[in-house]
Image (spheres, rainbow, N blue to C red):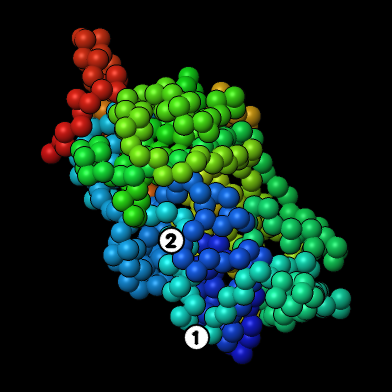
């Protein structure tokens, strides 16, 4: 097959997905142009068009590895900038399904970095690529499609610097990385292409986030605390160390359990979680600003595979699938898509979109299933609870119990959560046996009066060797 050369690719959106897609294409296209409607900041800061940027983000280890592959030295750059890193089990406290997990060594080392810092460093690295151009304050209002051969010929944009005058940016490929609120498929409907089928799951999730000054004594030096929601208490909390000696604290609640913005009530909400050290820390830490809300009414998956699309149009990232952000999959799935896109560029341009969508289908199937099945543990979330979903969620309940006493269970789960291993690895015979024994052991210890296994006290803060 002939490589794609002497051509121009236009990416709509300069978020994490758009930046990764641009890097993937830069080795195959002569010119790559990223257009962004927002004003891009010179220094890392949250943007108006990325409201989720104010809140806690998780970059999985798999996502970190891919970004480092696309931009060599990128992870070291983040750490040098002050992004904390540590072991998922020995440096981060986990309370899942109401159970405080045993500490141990998992070998899984995430980098805790804010979304604005991550995006800013990605943007800086991409700007250094000679054939890439990023244009901000430039909004797409239509996609140009040749009426005869039904091929994309470019995008029509408004440039704020040109007095909002419309102009055409010619393109051989248009990548839609504008996110879950993408309007591009509506533009395509005007050209006679039907919108893709959508799969939605209402989750009615609300975030509230505040930042605090981080002191060396906080959490005895640990870099994070994750408290998951449960069916009986659909509230969660995420305390993550960030660059600049700060904490980001995101509280989350489903349905009527929306966390408040007022500082005192914010702390009261934190006190309702089975991790008393969270509220204690917040009561004594220095607040660095007001709280902000973010609402996620539903998760969305658009089924572009099999849809009629113009040649030269390629959806990407959250435009295709927008997950529940609680599980931290979005940025890392976009990174995995970027690798597939890079591989697909070696071939015929006419079939690029088809090959890309087929290539990412297993990635999306697995990530969507993990996210959706976990959401369906909440009794008020509407959706199809198949026999497989019920069995998997029952097994997860046992696994969460087993993690109280067995750090090897925690390590295996961490590898799946960070997209390093597939979910099936948790069902291997040896791990299955550990889960069954660990869950039964917790039940026996609880009956015999060992309340520490489920109470959420501090007794399990020591590292289990």
Reading the image, the residue beneath label 2 is: 118
Query: 141 or 291, which is in the foreground?
Result: 291
Quarter that holds the N terminus: bottom right
Q: Residues within 10 Å of mark 2 (few under 14, many from 20)?
A: some
Q: Which mark is residue 130?
A: 1
Q: Is residue 121 left or right of residue 349?
A: left
Residue positioned 35% across, 73% down in the render: 72
Q: In the image, residue 440 lies at what x, y percent?
A: 27, 20
- SS for callout 2: helix
* Location of residue 221 (image quadrant): top left
Q: Position of residue 425 (x, y in %)?
A: 35, 44
Disc 1, SS: loop
Q: Residue at x 25, y 48 (%)?
A: 87
Q: Quadrant of residue 428?
A: top left
Which residue occupies 67% across, 44% down?
Answer: 199
Mark positioned earlier in the residue sequence (2 or 1): 2
């Amino acid at each position: 097959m002939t490589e794609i050369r002497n051509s121009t690719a236009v990416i709509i959106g300069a978020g994490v997905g758009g930046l990764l897609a641009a890097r993937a294409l830069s080795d195959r296209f002569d010119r790559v142009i990223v257009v962004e409607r927002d004003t891009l900041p010179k220094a890392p800061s949250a943007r108006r068009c990325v409201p989720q940027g104010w809140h806690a983000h998780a970059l999985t280890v798999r996502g970190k590895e891919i970004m480092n592959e696309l931009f060599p030295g990128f992870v070291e750059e983040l750490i040098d900038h002050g992004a904390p890193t540590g072991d998922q089990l020995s440096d981060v406290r986990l309370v899942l399904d109401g159970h405080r997990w045993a500490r141990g060594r998992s070998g899984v080392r995430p980098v805790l970095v804010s979304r604005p810092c991550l995006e800013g460093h990605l943007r800086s690295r991409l700007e250094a690529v000679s054939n890439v151009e990023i244009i901000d304050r430039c909004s797409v209002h239509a996609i140009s499609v040749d009426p005869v051969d039904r091929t994309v010929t470019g995008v029509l944009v408004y440039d704020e610097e040109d007095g909002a005058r419309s102009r055409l940016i010619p393109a051989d490929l248009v990548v839609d990385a504008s996110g879950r609120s993408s309007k591009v498929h509506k533009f395509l409907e005007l050209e006679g292409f039907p919108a893709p089928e959508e799969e939605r799951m209402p989750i009615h999730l609300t975030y509230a986030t505040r930042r605090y000054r981080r002191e060396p004594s906080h959490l005895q030096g640990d870099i994070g605390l994750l408290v998951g929601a449960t069916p009986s208490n659909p509230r969660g909390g995420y305390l993550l160390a960030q660059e600049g000696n700060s904490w980001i604290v995101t509280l989350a609640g489903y349905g009527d359990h929306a966390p408040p913005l007022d500082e005192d009530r914010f702390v009261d909400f934190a006190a309702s979680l089975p991790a008393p050290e969270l509220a204690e820390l917040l009561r004594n830490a220095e607040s660095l600003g007001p709280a902000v809300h973010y609402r996620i009414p539903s998760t969305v998956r658009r089924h572009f595979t099999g849809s009629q699309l113009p040649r030269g149009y390629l959806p990407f990232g959250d435009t295709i699938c927008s997950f529940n952000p609680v599980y931290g999959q979005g940025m890392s799935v976009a990174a995995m898509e970027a690798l597939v896109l890079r591989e697909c560029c070696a071939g015929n341009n006419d079939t690029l979109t088809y090959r890309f969508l087929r290539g990412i289908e297993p990635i999306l199937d697995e990530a969507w299933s993990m996210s959706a099945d976990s959401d369906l543990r909440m009794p008020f979330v509407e959706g199809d609870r198949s026999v497989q979903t019920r069995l998997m969620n029952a097994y997860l309940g046992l696994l969460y119990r087993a993690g109280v006493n067995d750090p090897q269970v925690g390590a295996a789960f961490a590898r799946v959560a960070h997209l390093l291993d597939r979910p099936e690895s948790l069902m291997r015979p040896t791990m299955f046996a550990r889960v069954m024994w660990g869950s039964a052991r917790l039940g026996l210890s609880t009956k015999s009066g060992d309340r520490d296994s489920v109470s959420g006290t501090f007794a399990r803060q020591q590292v289990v060797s």
